[in-house]
Image (spheres, rainbow, N blue to C red):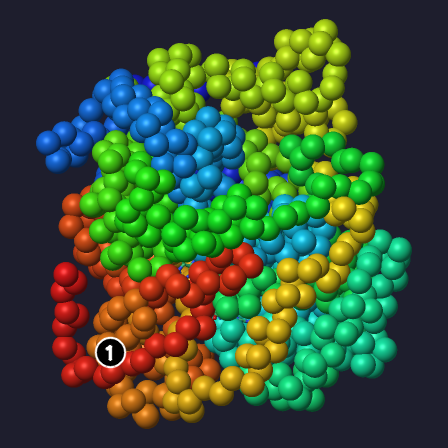
């Protein structure tokens, strides 16, 4: 059924193969050029039903990233304190010898699991971590979500009863996009999967639509906007509350067809009553009249969508801001209508349910041991991981499994976490292709093969796509002769067996178990279920699981065979209204003012009166098109040219502080001090400085030679991890106070301890 792979070994003439790009959320279809088992080029697949040929510099560097000589080619195991190459058998033997014994003695919570960002970009990351967690019976789960989009999950859980019910802006049809805290021209979009996001924004403008961007920096996205509000960081919730206020005050609220499905509108009106444009103007540093104008434009647009991302999520009032984004979509009648914000329907989603009340969404069902942080969506704040390891107590975390995560760089206070990983753990496993700042602490590293050797399906990201479609790409390249690589799905399955006391069993047993459980939940009669199982095609466990999900999914007649037969994808149509199917609240309606939100609003109200010193500086992040979080700095094509890890500051602030362009500055925050070269630019507003994250590749014992040669500095060392959005446990990574001191110009960066 699937295209046969050429025989490995002989250098063949170059051929091409399709591969969905796993490097960011845009999921572009790529055409790879392959010589033998080496990827020598990548271009956009012009026939891809979704991306239609788009590619960015990261996708174009696919071959170099895939063939990075620093990638681990087989497992590493620690013996006598040193990591050395080992066989897969040795690696899993050691895990099986250590983890079940710890679970037996201290309970499942003694094993922490950290899931990082690339899990949304691999099939393995979608299919196996839930099984790993249920096998371990651990509540010690930490993911990149609490450095990112957990405020959105919490807001959706409370509003719609389902933390994964995330409406996305209908980019291709909307007349008006109000975009906050996102810079898709560099990030290519997030929780809004849209290959060629830049082109889609330009198309919006070309059809006469309006783009408003709210960002303390004049980003490339802001430059495209009809209106740019250079808001003070951390103030989005106040701005959005004021917009809601104006809608009520000027009688612009019009739920349209939504009216029947929403409760709590008068309560929201009362809740935002204090948030007049005048009351929020100082906190936001946006004139009251301009706020009124934005509200009117939003209400007047034939269709409109409000969309907020990282810059309005990883902030002090992140959940409130994310809630208000959808409150505005509701109040303007734009939720669940074409041109507004709609719920995608992916091919592997469960069949839509008949509208009915659901079980609702609860927060804080348990709390973290040390800090007492409430769980959100079953997770604890990643910022609390270090203390959960290092604080003595019977219930402390003693073993850690990190999968595709580099929290030493991506989470607050990496130095503290670094020490906790070094001194506080009995055992650590990392599933990671690199020996990096985090995995260097592992006792066992299990490296997945390069992406060209993995099949790809976007289980997670299709659920946030601006157009329904389905695409599958099998592995593009076979393992070269003599290679020790193991498919990442098999790594995950073997890991589950090893920690669960079934070490050595056939890894497809894990897939069969999931298939049987899934079939049992369908309520199908046993003979029909057995028949369905027998009909599944696919040459691997994960392929059979994908086939089952497609067959049980919302699109009649879709199977793996059908999807595989359409290598450029199958178009499933524009997004459609489906709110009734989505709602799982106890009332069966959108609950517009959930109690936890109402209880958090006074905190925002108090912040309106907060006066900061005139010369207070707050820090925000930024992303660069040729980078991705912490792990792409080892690819020469993506890490050349001028230093990108610079502290941007406004000329007026620079002058006041006596900082000249290019000089080294010392930046101080609650978590520590770092140094970076200053870059003076008026693209940041006054009172704001900006430093990107994911840098600081100067720790010993890693194997990322290119990254280490241009290490940059770790912005997250400025944070002590105590600053969180309380409802979601998400770290405040944007809009925190720092102080800046000019050092002598040209002084070399101080070596890190
Ligand atoms: N200050 C600040 N900090 C931030 C952010 C910010 O904006 N500002 N952004 C936050 C956000 S949004 C996120 S998502 C987090 C990301 O933080 P993390 O989730 O820690 O992700 P990365 O830093 O991308 O590290 C990914 C890890 O996965 C490994 N990896 C790459 N490909 C694969 C694969 O195919 N399989 C496996 N098993 N591993 C793989 C890489 O080698 C690396 O170790 O960072 C957060 N940190
Ligand atoms: N090139 C590249 N692409 C990426 C990534 C990457 O690292 N590099 N990371 C991927 C990941 S994991 C994610 S989650 C996405 C994120 O994608 P986006 O959500 O687009 O995130 P950013 O590009 O960081 O843009 C956030 C913007 O918020 C602004 N901001 C900061 N504080 C505030 C505030 O208080 N209010 C407002 N309104 N704005 C504020 C910042 O100036 C910044 O421009 O990108 C993904 N794509
Ligand atoms: S935009 Fe994202 S998915 Fe598309 S080529 Fe670039 S990195 Fe890959
Ligand atoms: Mo992210």
Name the residue located 41 percent from the left edge and 32 percent from the top edge: 108
Question: Which percent across, then down, holds residue 313?
Answer: 53, 62
Q: Residue furthest left?
A: 80
Name the residue located 64 percent from the left edge and 60 percent from the top edge: 596
397 left or right of 280 in image:
left
Image vertical order of residue 42 relative to residue 626, above or below = above
Q: Quadrant of residue 565?
A: top right
Name the residue located 57 percent from the left edge and 79 percent from the top edge: 606
Q: Residue furthest front?
A: 394
Q: Quadrant of residue 703?
A: top left
Residue at mark 1: 665
Q: Nearer the viewer, residue 200 or 187?
A: 187
Question: Which percent across, then down, holds residue 216?
Answer: 50, 77
Q: Dot 1, how many residues are within 10 Å of its Cα: few (below 14), some (14-19), or many (20+)?
A: many
* Residue 60 in sight here: no
Please tell me whether mark 1 sits on a helix, a strand or a loop.
Answer: strand
Question: Which percent across, then down, holds residue 605?
Answer: 61, 78
Q: Nearer the viewer, residue 16 or 397?
A: 397
Name the quadrant of the C terminus: bottom left
Image vertical order of residue 326 relative to residue 82, above or below = below
Q: Nearer the viewer, residue 379 or 2?
A: 379
């Amino acid at each position: 059924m699937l295209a046969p792979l050429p025989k490995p070994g002989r250098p063949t003439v170059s051929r091409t193969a399709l591969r969905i790009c796993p490097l960011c959320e845009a999921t572009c279809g790529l055409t790879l050029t392959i010589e033998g088992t080496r990827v020598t080029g990548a271009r956009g697949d012009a026939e891809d039903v979704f991306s239609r040929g788009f590619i960015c510099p990261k996708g174009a560097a696919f071959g170099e990233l895939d063939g990075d000589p620093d990638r681990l080619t087989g497992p590493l195991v620690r013996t006598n304190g040193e990591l050395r190459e080992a066989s897969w058998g040795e690696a899993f033997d050691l895990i099986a010898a250590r983890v079940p014994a710890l679970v037996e003695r201290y309970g499942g919570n003694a094993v922490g699991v950290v899931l990082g960002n690339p899990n949304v970009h691999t099939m393995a990351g979608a299919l196996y971590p839930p099984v790993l967690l249920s096998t371990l019976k651990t509540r010690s789960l930490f993911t990149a979500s609490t450095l990112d989009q957990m405020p959105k999950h919490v807001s959706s859980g409370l509003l719609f009863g389902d933390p994964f019910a995330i409406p996305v802006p209908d980019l291709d049809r909307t007349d008006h996009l109000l975009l906050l805290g996102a810079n898709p021209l560099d990030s290519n979009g997030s929780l809004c999967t849209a290959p060629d996001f830049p082109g889609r924004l330009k198309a919006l403008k070309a059809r006469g639509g309006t783009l408003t961007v709210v960002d303390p920096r004049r980003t490339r996205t802001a430059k495209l906007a009809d209106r740019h509000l250079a808001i003070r960081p951390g103030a989005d919730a106040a701005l959005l509350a004021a917009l809601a206020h104006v809608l009520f005050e000027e009688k612009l609220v019009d739920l349209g067809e939504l009216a029947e499905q929403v409760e709590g509108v008068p309560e929201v009106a009362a809740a935002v009553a204090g948030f007049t444009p005048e009351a929020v103007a100082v906190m936001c540093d946006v004139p009251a009249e301009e706020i009124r104008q934005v509200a009117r434009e939003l209400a007047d647009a034939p269709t409109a969508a409000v969309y907020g991302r990282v810059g309005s999520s990883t902030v002090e009032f992140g959940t409130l801001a994310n809630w208000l984004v959808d409150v505005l979509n509701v109040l303007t009648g734009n939720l669940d209508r074409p041109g507004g914000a709609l719920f995608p329907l992916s091919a592997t989603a469960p069949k839509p349910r008949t509208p009915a009340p659901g079980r609702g969404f609860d927060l804080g069902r348990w709390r973290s041991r040390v800090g007492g942080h409430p769980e959100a969506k079953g997770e604890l704040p990643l910022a609390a991981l270090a203390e959960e390891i290092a604080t003595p107590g019977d219930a402390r975390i003693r073993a850690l499994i990190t999968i595709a995560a580099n929290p030493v760089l991506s989470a607050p206070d990496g130095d503290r976490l670094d020490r906790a990983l070094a001194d506080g753990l009995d055992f650590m496993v990392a599933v990671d292709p690199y020996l990096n700042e985090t995995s260097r602490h592992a006792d066992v590293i299990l490296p997945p093969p390069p992406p060209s050797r993995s099949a790809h399906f976007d289980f997670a990201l299709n659920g946030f796509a601006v157009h329904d479609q389905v695409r599958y790409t099998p592995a593009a390249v076979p393992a070269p002769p003599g290679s020790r690589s193991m498919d990442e799905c098999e790594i995950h399955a073997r890991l589950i067996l090893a920690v669960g006391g079934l070490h050595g069993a056939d890894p497809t047993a894990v897939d069969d178990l999931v298939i049987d459980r899934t079939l049992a939940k369908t309520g199908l009669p046993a003979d029909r279920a057995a028949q369905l199982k027998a009909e599944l095609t696919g040459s691997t466990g994960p392929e059979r699981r994908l086939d089952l999900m497609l067959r049980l999914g919302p699109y009649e007649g879709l199977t793996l065979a059908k999807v595989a037969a359409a290598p450029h994808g199958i178009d499933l149509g524009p997004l459609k209204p489906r709110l009734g199917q989505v709602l799982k609240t106890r009332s069966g309606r959108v609950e517009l003012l959930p109690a936890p939100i109402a209880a958090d609003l006074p905190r925002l109200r108090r912040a309106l009166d907060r006066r900061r010193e005139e010369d207070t500086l707050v820090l925000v992040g930024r992303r660069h098109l040729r980078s991705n979080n912490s792990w792409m700095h080892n690819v020469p094509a993506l890490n050349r040219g001028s230093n990108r890890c610079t502290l941007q500051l406004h000329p007026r602030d620079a002058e006041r502080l006596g900082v000249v362009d290019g000089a080294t500055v010392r930046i101080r925050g609650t978590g520590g001090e770092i140094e970076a070269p200053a870059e003076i630019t008026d693209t940041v507003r006054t009172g704001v400085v900006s430093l990107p994250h994911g840098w600081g590749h100067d720790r010993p014992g890693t194997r990322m030679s290119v990254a280490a040669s241009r290490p940059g500095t770790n912005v997250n060392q400025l944070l002590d991890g105590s600053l969180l959005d309380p409802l979601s446990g998400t770290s405040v990574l944007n809009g925190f106070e720092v102080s800046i001191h000019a050092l002598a110009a040209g002084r070399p960066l101080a070596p890190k301890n």
